[in-house]
Image (spheres, rainbow, N blue to C red):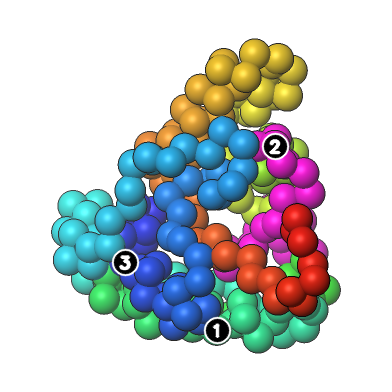
Amino acid sequence: RRAFQMSVDRQKMLDKLFYGQGQVENGVMPTGLIYHNPNPAKIPYDPEGARKLLAEAGYPNGVDMQIAVMTSGSDIALLKKMSEIVQAMAAQGGFRVSLKLMDEAAYTATRKDGKLFTYTNKWLADFNDPDNYFYTLFSKRNSAIRSYNIKDPEIFRAVEQGRSLLDPTKRAKLYRDLEKKIVVDEAAWFPLYSLTHIYVTQPRVTAF
């Protein structure tokens, strides 16, 4: 999983798809979210290092893997393009990626059963709190029905604890520690980037 993270040039991906209008993210909490860590451990782009990790893990000739891509629904063109770019880049790190096209019904049902393999997704918070990421994506139940399939009791306990903590300092530490465990220690989540929101307004619009 760590080798896969190291195989994708996320800045190049951001530049190609969105003209660089955003920032590469290295955690679960994106820029702008409360408790966002401005100095997280950075995931390096290092395809040669990725190949070395695969060799150390017993895969000197690389790994075959699939990325699921929906053929219907919203944002399909974008998610398909993202998956195609990841497919091309990951090859440099030793991953022979094939894209499996699935209609929305099959994709959703397979994911809900916890049997969907790697897939590209995007998430927009409903409210400005890490709980909308950690509980929604990484709680015991939600991890299963989203096919993330994390099975770490420590993560589940921390996710629940964060929901009831009142001290902002303790909450910030809890979520940053949890973020590190998920993204760095277990490499169970591969953050790509968040986008800059660009608005066009008339000169008469003020205090926006």
**Dot 1: element:** helix
Residue bearing mark 2: 129
What is the total number of numbered labels drawn onto the structure image?
Answer: 3
Q: Residue at x 38, y 69 (%)?
A: 11
Q: Residue at x 22, y 71 (%)?
A: 61
Which residue is more in the foreground, 74 or 94? 74
Q: Residue at x 36, y 61 (%)?
A: 4
Label 3 packing within 10 angstroms: few (<14), some (14-19), many (20+): many
Can residue 47 be seen in the rendering of this structure? yes
Give how far apart the Cα atoms at labels 2 and 1 are: 30 Å
Q: Where 33 sits versus 15, above or below?
A: above
Q: Residue at x 75, y 55 (%)?
A: 207
Residue bearing mark 1: 81
Give how far apart the Cα atoms at labels 3 and 2 are: 30 Å
Amino acid carrying mark 2 in the image:
Asp
In the rendered image, residue 204, in percent from the top left (x then y), is placed at: 80, 71
Q: Which of the two labelled residues, at mark 2 and mark 1, occupies the earlier sequence position?
A: 1
Q: Quadrant of the C terminus?
A: bottom right
Q: Could you tell me if the residues under marks 2 and 1 are in contact, i.e. CB atoms within 8 Å?
A: no
In the rendered image, residue 45, in percent from the top left (x then y), is placed at: 28, 62
Amino acid carrying mark 1 in the image:
Lys
Q: Where 77 sits versus 138, above or below?
A: below
Q: Which of the two labelled residues, at mark 3 and mark 1, occupies the earlier sequence position?
A: 3
Magenta span includes 115: yes
Give how far apart the Cα atoms at labels 3 and 1 are: 17 Å
Label drawn at residue 7 = 3
